[in-house]
């Protein structure tokens, strides 16, 4: 029984990271109705930025997180201004959005490769202890605790913004009909920029958590595909669905890694996702959302 509880804890911790990635990915999809693959580029650049803050400027854990979150938000706004704002105003096709986001993601990844090469880096040990001993047979890694706490705080703040503030009302209005929202007095460009800023903040949190959980390497941005998978499982375009999908994906990966092995785990996870979507194509949230046309 203890073994399964341990797997459950590990799965929830990993799933919380996937949920953060999926939330940032889904937030943009819900507004612009396209898959923003530059989100992964923002995530990996923010992860390396945090590494620089810690190693070159010797910042502590909390200041590093706060500065990196702001950096991620600003970087995402810059990506939106360069890659998507003109396309949005001219009502460009979904293919143009896809190409622009893919190129931006690749550009950000290549900037990291040119700056840091393809070497692996790791954050220093922020905490004196590596594990908490819950019982004689049950432990939880300190990094997993931090991942859970940061993810939970980020999710709660996002939900508060979306459902308890005027900005959240504007974002949800844009997700339904941007033209009508503009006629109702919403500054679409400003709200869009703030939406990307929030998405970038989530990407920065995800980048830090992935750097703590794994290692820093330029291909870290490919984890955005995990976020995309989680958002599809949860219900593409649905914020709460992204949370559920991330947790489901994390639990699946941990349990399958232990029962079928790490080599077969990606194939089994992919197969499960296909079977799940055959029977419930709208995802857990039960909502169909179309891409931008």
Image (cartoon, rainbow, N blue to C red):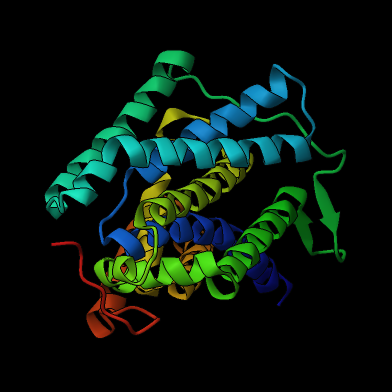
Give percent across and percent down for residue 85.
Answer: 28, 44
* Of residues 60 and 281, the one drawn nearer to the viewer in this rendering: 60
Task: Indicate left or right for 65 with 197 as reference.
Answer: right
Is 76 located above or below residue 276 in the figure? above
Task: Indicate left or right for 107 with 3 as reference.
Answer: left
Q: How many marks?
A: 0
Give percent across and percent down for residue 52.
Answer: 63, 22
Q: Is residue 265 visible?
A: no
Is 180 located above or below residue 206 in the figure? below
Give percent across and percent down for residue 188.
Answer: 35, 57
Residue in view at x 39 percent, y 81 percent: 284
Image quarter where the N terminus lies is bottom right
Image quarter where the C terminus lies is bottom left
Residue in view at x 55 percent, y 47 percent: 201
Residue in view at x 58 percent, y 25 percent: 121
Q: Is residue 203 visible?
A: yes
Residue 99 figure quarter:
top left
Give percent across and percent down for residue 152.
Answer: 66, 63
Residue in view at x 36 percent, y 51 percent: 189
* Of residues 55 and 100, the one drawn nearer to the viewer in this rendering: 100
């Amino acid at each position: 029984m203890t073994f399964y509880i341990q797997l459950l804890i590990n799965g929830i911790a990993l799933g919380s990271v996937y949920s953060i990635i999926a939330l940032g990915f889904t937030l943009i999809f819900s507004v612009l109705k396209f898959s923003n693959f530059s989100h992964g580029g923002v995530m990996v650049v923010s992860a390396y930025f945090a590494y620089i803050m810690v190693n070159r400027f010797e910042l502590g854990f909390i200041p590093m997180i706060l500065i990196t979150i702001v950096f991620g938000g600003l970087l995402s706004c810059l990506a939106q201004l360069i890659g998507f704002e003109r396309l949005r105003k001219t009502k460009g096709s979904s293919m143009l959005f896809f190409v622009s986001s893919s190129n931006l993601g690749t550009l950000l990844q290549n900037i990291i490769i040119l700056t840091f090469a393809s070497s692996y880096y790791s954050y220093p040990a922020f905490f004196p202890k590596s594990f908490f001993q819950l019982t004689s047979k049950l432990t939880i890694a300190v990094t997993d605790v931090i991942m859970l706490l940061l993810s939970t705080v980020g999710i709660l703040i996002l939900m508060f913004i979306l459902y308890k503030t005027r900005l959240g009302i504007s974002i949800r209005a844009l997700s339904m009909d941007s033209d009508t929202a503009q006629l109702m007095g919403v500054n679409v460009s400003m709200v869009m920029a703030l939406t990307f800023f929030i998405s970038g903040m989530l990407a920065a949190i995800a980048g830090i958590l992935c750097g703590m959980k794994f290692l820093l390497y330029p291909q870290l941005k490919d984890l955005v595909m995990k976020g995309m998978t989680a958002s599809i499982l949860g219900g593409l375009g649905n914020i709460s669905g992204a949370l559920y999908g991330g947790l489901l994906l994390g639990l699946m990966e941990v349990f399958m890694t232990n029962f079928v092995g790490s080599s077969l785990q990606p194939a089994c996870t992919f197969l499960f996702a296909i079977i799940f979507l055959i029977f419930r194509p709208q995802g857990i949230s039960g909502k169909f959302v179309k891409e931008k046309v």
